[in-house]
Amino acid sequence: MLVGTCEIELLFPGSRSLKEKRFVMKSIKDRIRARFNVSVAEVDGHGLRQRGALGVAVAASESGYIHKVISQVVKFVEGDGRVEVLDYRVEVL
């Protein structure tokens, strides 16, 4: 079994408060979980109103499948007009 992880650094350009950022972050996390059946959590930037990071984890038997799913998740987040993807890092263990 292999496990793939991805940390996605996000910018929330329209966020004026932590409450607004948390609302958007929760919405994105819920949509990722429902669509891709992966584990996802906010992993950084908890106290910042315009920055944050998502951690995504995928378990599978083939690394190709892991890369495919993570790529789809990143594209999905990039397509959300409420955030900008600043950077992301993928690791397969």
Image: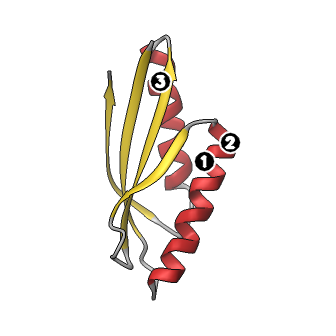
Q: How many marks?
A: 3
- Neighbour tally class for label 2: few under 14, some 14-19, many 20 plus, Cα within 10 Å: few
Q: Nearer the viewer, residue 76 or 46?
A: 46
Q: Residue 66 shows which numbered tag? A: 3
Q: Residue 35 shows which numbered tag? A: 2
Q: Amino acid at mark 3?
A: Ile
Q: Nearer the viewer, residue 69 or 42?
A: 42
Among the two numbered marks 3 and 1 on one chain, the one whose residue lies closer to the N terminus:
1
Which residue appears at 64% of the width and 54% of the height? 30
Location of the C terminus by quadrant is top left
Mark 2 residue element: helix
Which residue appears at 58% of the width and 63% of the height? 26
Residue 84 image offset from top left, x and y in percent: 42, 63
Q: Amino acid at mark 2?
A: Arg
- Is residue 65 shown above or below 77? above
Q: Residue 59 shows which numbered tag? A: none
Which residue appears at 53% of the width and 81% of the height? 20
Q: Residue furthest right?
A: 34
Q: Give residue 6's quadrant in the image.
A: top left
Horizontal relation, residue 68 to residue 86: left or right: right
Q: Residue 32 shows which numbered tag? A: 1
Residue 34 image offset from top left, x and y in percent: 69, 45
Spatial CA distance of label 1 from label 2 is 5 Å
- Is residue 45 shown above or below 32? below
Mark 3 residue element: helix
Horizontal relation, residue 20 to residue 54: left or right: right
Q: Amino acid at mark 1?
A: Ile
Spatial CA distance of label 3 from label 2 is 15 Å
Residue 42 image offset from top left, x and y in percent: 43, 57
